[in-house]
Image (cartoon, helix red, strand yellow):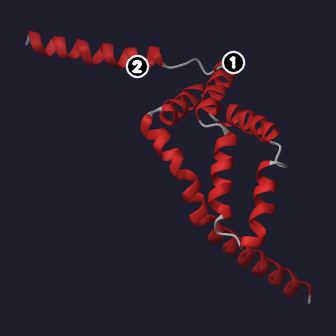
Amino acid sequence: MRIRIYLLIVVFLTCFSQMAIALDDTSKNRESQAERYLKVTTPKEMMDDMTEKVSSNLPLESRELYKNMMTKHLDIEFLTSLMKNAMIKHFTADELKALADFYGSPIGKSAMKKFGAYMADIMPHIQTEIMKAQKKAFEEMNAKKK
């Protein structure tokens, strides 16, 4: 009987400690956790990796132009700010903390290293599907005009 009471107390305290660990969902905490996330998964590194992998799917004569567009001419500071503000708007402080914890972990870092190759694999298919959808939408729109 005494063991059951101790177990119940341990379970109760564990649940309470998890609630105590939760961050207050304030603007300041959201901003702090978003900044933490953006330090462990920098948009520049993500874009550079994706650019390198996606460019390998392009015709040889288009690769340099694409790389320049995505590295030299892309305003990464603006995109970083945009990402940070959107994260603060849509995620709680605890969600942002969890993202930063995961992507800052060894397994999260490993997953992010594969993200560029993943995007390179799916991007041509996504673009093809978007073009097909756009064509169908224009055809539908033109059919309604007649």
Farthest residue in the bottom direction?
146
Query: Are the residues flagged by discs 2 and 1 in contact, CB closer than 8 Å?
Result: no
Residue 136 image point, x, y percent? 76, 81
Point 72% across, 33% down: residue? 84
Image quarter where the C terminus lies is bottom right
Kind of residue indicated by mark 2: Gln
Q: In the drawing, does residue 136 fall left or right of residue 114?
A: right
Position of residue 116 measured from the top left corner of the image (x, y, whole percent) = 59, 54
Q: Is residue 30 above or below residue 90?
A: above
Of callouts 2 and 1, the N-terminal one = 2
Mark 1 belongs to which amino acid? Lys
Residue position for label 2: 18
Question: Quadrant of residue 50 in the image?
Answer: bottom right
Report the front residue among 137 and 79: 79
User: Helix, strand or loop at disc 2?
Assistant: helix
Q: Which mark is residue 28?
A: 1
> Most extreme residue toward the right, as rendered?
145
Residue placed at 10% from the left, 13% from the top? Answer: 3
Q: Quadrant of residue 133?
A: bottom right
